[in-house]
């Protein structure tokens, strides 16, 4: 190729490259982030009360432990351990002064801070491991690299060994901290109320990572390299930690009142105007929103395929994560006083009765029920068409398989499908069992109905084959 032709070709390719970049969609210039997803155990609606437990006083926090144990804190400063499988209280512990923070479970250790700035570490057997006197506590406490990170009111950050209370390092951000978080790369993030984002290394070295609007709220969440947070002026912001810049920002009708949740590429959050939102995590676009009966005071709970929402005024609500459609509710008697707590086979809900001054713990489980009914009562005569209809409660996208049994002989008469009814034209008399097997992706139930068929209804019954 001649030199002038080669030069023209290179110029042409360069021009095309410039045009591709300048005219390409935004995602070519700023690739959309890929988000990770973590889902919790499956639960289904409706729910029923499996067990209940009366509790003296008002429960203000409830946390899960290991080996079927739960722990709660009351307004009087009493911490109780309870084994819900054995249905027994295993210990009680009274804080030296009234509580300041809620309970926190890190591994096998429980933590609480009282109003005299004592940080107390308890074993899950109710034994005091150590007390540590803090400065003026700032209200933030999270696990970090097997340790405990706490914020103080003067902007200091203290990292302790949870087993002994020994201070590993102490550092300062120079401003009061609104929230703490830990990135996917095990970097401790501290977000100041005035908008600064600080990064702390494992050794306590501090680095200013970015700056946002002032008046940051104490509700943040992380997914991979993205930090999601809210401001007093009703904004929700996504911050790219690697690029150290804002990915997107959106104004909503109210302020965040709890930390956002991330699932299926979406961000779920609740605001002070009694609305639950689902946003696209990569862009901030609103996918759906739902009004709730009153302002949210508790954390949202992710129990795929549902988002569970509790306010102080019943009912407990469940929304479909994808569509926002209300998928279920539970109406307890009394005021809900804590976030629902998921356990292996259901959830625990704490209630408070103002008149009695007493609380109760409800142990809820999915109500799973299959019933089978017939269009005509038993007995019927040979040649009479009878339709059997199944009703399944507590199943997600149920599948139905019908069978017919006479004596020891059992025959599948309608293969598994989404159809919940089967039409039967009996040709011979006898005692039958008509049954249905219902299943979804996680459970199977079966029920039967006895039915008697008597002699021909007509001597002249003709059957065509």
Image (tube, rainbow, N blue to C red):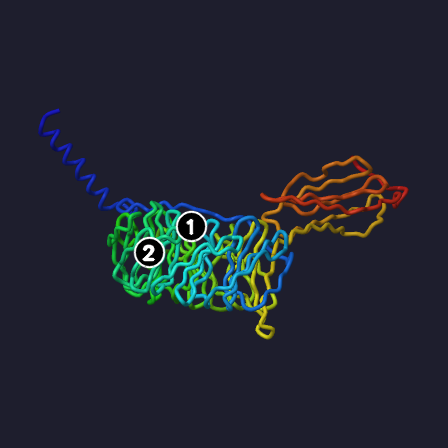
Residue under label 1, please give it.
163
Residue under label 2, please give it.
158
Q: Quadrant of the N terminus?
A: top left
Image coords of residue 387 (percent x, y) = 74, 48
Position of residue 202 in the picture relative to residue 91 (left or right): left
As drawn, the residue found furthest toward the bottom would be 355
Task: Write down the quadrant of residue 31 in the picture.
Answer: top left
Image coords of residue 45 (percent x, y) = 59, 55
Residue 140 in view of the camera: yes
Q: Nearer the viewer, residue 459 or 278?
A: 278
Q: SS class of the residue under badge 1?
A: loop
Position of residue 127 in the picture relative to residue 382 (left or right): left
Q: Is residue 399 above or below residue 218?
A: above
Q: SS class of the residue under badge 2?
A: strand
Q: Nearer the viewer, residue 399 or 74?
A: 74
Image coords of residue 257 (percent x, y) = 42, 64
Counting residues from the start of the chain, the first of labels 2 and 1 encountered is: 2
As drawn, the residue found furthest toward the left would be 4
Q: Quadrant of the C terminus?
A: top right
Position of residue 31 in the picture relative to residue 429 (left or right): left
Image coords of residue 3 (percent x, y) = 9, 27
């Amino acid at each position: 190729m001649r030199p002038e032709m080669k030069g023209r070709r290179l110029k042409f390719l360069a021009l095309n490259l410039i045009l591709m970049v300048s005219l390409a969609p935004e995602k070519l210039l700023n690739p959309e982030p890929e988000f990770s997803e973590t889902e919790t155990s499956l639960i289904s609606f409706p729910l029923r009360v499996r067990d209940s437990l009366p509790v003296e006083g008002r429960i203000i926090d409830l946390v899960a432990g290991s080996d079927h144990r739960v722990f709660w804190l009351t307004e009087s400063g009493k911490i109780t351990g309870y084994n819900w499988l054995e249905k027994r209280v295993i210990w009680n512990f009274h804080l030296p002064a009234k509580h300041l923070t809620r309970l926190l479970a890190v591994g096998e250790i429980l933590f609480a801070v009282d109003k005299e700035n004592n940080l107390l570490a308890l074993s899950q057997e109710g034994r005091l491991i150590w007390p540590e006197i803090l400065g003026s506590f700032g209200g933030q406490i999270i696990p970090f690299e097997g340790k405990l990170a706490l914020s103080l009111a003067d902007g200091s950050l203290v990292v302790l060994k949870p087993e002994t209370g020994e201070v590993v390092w102490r550092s300062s951000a120079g401003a009061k901290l609104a929230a703490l978080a830990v990135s996917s790369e095990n970097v401790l993030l501290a977000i100041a109320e005035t908008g600064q984002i600080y990064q702390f290394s494992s050794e306590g070295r501090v680095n200013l990572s970015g700056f946002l609007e002032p008046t940051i709220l104490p509700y943040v969440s992380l997914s991979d390299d993205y930090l999601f947070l809210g401001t007093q002026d009703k904004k929700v912001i996504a911050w790219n930690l690697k690029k150290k810049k804002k990915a997107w920002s959106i104004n909503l009708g109210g302020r965040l009142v709890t930390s956002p949740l991330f699932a299926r590429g979406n961000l779920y959050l609740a605001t002070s105007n009694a609305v639950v939102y689902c946003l696209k995590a990569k862009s901030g676009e609103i996918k759906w929103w739902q009004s709730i009966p009153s302002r949210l005071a508790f954390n949202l709970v992710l129990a795929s395929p549902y988002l569970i929402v509790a306010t102080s005024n019943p009912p407990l609500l469940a929304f479909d994560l994808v569509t926002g459609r209300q998928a279920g509710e539970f109406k307890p008697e009394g005021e809900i006083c804590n976030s629902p707590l998921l356990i292996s086979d259901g959830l625990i809900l704490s209630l408070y009765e103002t008149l009695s001054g007493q609380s109760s713990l409800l142990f809820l489980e999915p109500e799973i029920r299959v019933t089978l009914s017939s269009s005509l009562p038993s007995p019927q005569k040979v040649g009479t068409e009878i339709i059997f209809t199944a009703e399944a409660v507590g199943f997600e996208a149920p599948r139905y398989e019908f069978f017919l049994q006479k004596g020891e002989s059992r025959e599948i008469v309608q293969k598994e499908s989404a159809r919940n009814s089967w039409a039967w034209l009996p040709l011979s008399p006898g005692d039958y069992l008509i049954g249905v097997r219902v299943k979804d992706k996680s459970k199977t139930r079966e029920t039967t109905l006895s039915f008697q068929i008597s002699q021909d209804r007509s001597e002249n019954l003709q059957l065509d084959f």
